[in-house]
Amino acid sequence: MQNKILMGHLFALVTILLWGTTFISTKVLLRSFTPIEILFFRFIMGLIVLFLIYPHRLRVTDKKQEWIFAGAGLSGITLYYLFENIALVYAPASNVGVITATAPFFTALLACRFLAGEALQKKFILGFVLAIAGIAMISFNSATQLQINPLGDFLALAAAATWAVYAVLSKKISSFGYNAIQSTRHTFMYGLVFMLPALLFMDFRWGFERLADPVNLLNLLFLGVGASAMCFVTWNMAVKLLGAIKTSAYIYLAPVVTVITSVIVLDEKITTVIACGMLLTMTGLLLSGDVVALVKANLRSKAKQNIL
């Protein structure tokens, strides 16, 4: 049992390590693509990859489950990314980064209401406070003043709330017993369907000639294959093994990964404030995910086996 839980933490960690670097790829692609184009192309690509990896049709045993898949596609694929991308148009990235990082807290509240056995613990609350404080230090480090934009901040908050809905629905989907790749692919399909109306009203064009640029092609492949196809599968596996609350706590780590990646790729500097923020964020993650207790329990179990 403990090995499965450790595997769940590994899935969540790998997912966030990749998701935390998507900021760099998206920033590069925004020079040639609009936000809706990046979103649509990456998930089309992810859907194709998942079909190639596991080309077996998902046969839903209960038609009522289709509503759960549709809700997951609408919340976690369409609405979350649209809200987040549009929020960046109206509000500073620092605001959006801090506000969307509240997603684990929304997830905990929803999980306590709709998922049996996912209780909200004091450690999670303390971890949430520490992580948000750390993320705020990272995000506002270079800002001369906090800029408030009601529309942008509201959209960022809506993104956090919709991700929480996706986290809870993905936990329900994992209980159906379907193959993880099939479930993820089915969710992608609904997400793309709900995305189609947005293509009509937002600045979208096919423009495949842009893929002739190797930089554009490689970054889009990373977002489509790695950050979408692979990461959504590993994330759903983590939710299945850990639960929605503990898995969502790993979202706190994303800004830390982004900062480290920016240092490596963009040659940005880590200040003392950012370093302290990263430490607080990591501490909050460990408390919220209860990783320390798990490691100690695993070590005690192995020591007991050695004695016997």
Image (spheres, rainbow, N blue to C red):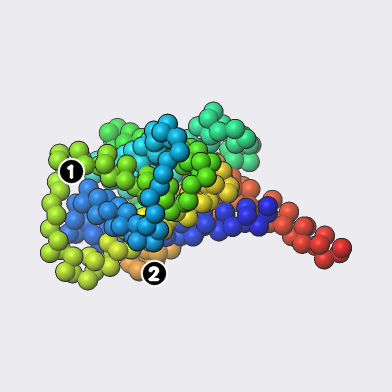
Work out whether 38 lies above or below 155: below
Residue 9, position in %: x, y? 57, 55
Q: Residue type at mark 2?
A: Ile
Residue farthest to the top?
Answer: 113
The residue closer to the viewer here, 85 or 195, is 195
The residue closer to the viewer here, 3 or 64, is 64
Work out whether 238 lies above or below 147: below
Residue 193, position in %: x, y? 26, 41
Q: Nearer the viewer, mark 1 or mark 2?
A: 1
Residue farthest to the right?
Answer: 308
The residue closer to the viewer here, 139 or 99, is 99
Is residue 249 in sight in this rendering? no
Q: Residue at x 37, y 46 (%)?
A: 186
Q: Residue at x 35, y 68 (%)?
A: 265
- The quadrant the C terminus occupies is bottom right
Q: Residues within 10 Å of mark 2 (few under 14, many from 20)?
A: few
Is residue 199 in sight in this rendering? yes
- Please identify the quarter of the rendering in which residue 113 is found: top right
Residue farthest to the bottom?
Answer: 214
Q: Residue type at mark 1?
A: Leu
The residue closer to the viewer here, 142 or 307, is 307
Tag 2 secondary structure: helix
Looking at marks 1 and 2 on the same chain, the residue that comes earlier in the sequence is marked by: 1
Check disc 2 and report the residue beneath it. Answer: 264
Q: Residue at x 12, y 64 (%)?
A: 209
Residue 295, position in %: x, y? 68, 56
Residue 211, position in %: x, y? 18, 65
Asked if marks 1 and 2 touch (Cβ < 8 Å), the reply is: no
Q: Residue at x 62, y 35 (%)?
A: 117
Task: Tell me the CA gap for discs 1 and 2.
Answer: 35 Å
Check disc 1 and report the residue beneath it. Answer: 199
Q: Residues within 10 Å of mark 1 (few under 14, many from 20)?
A: some
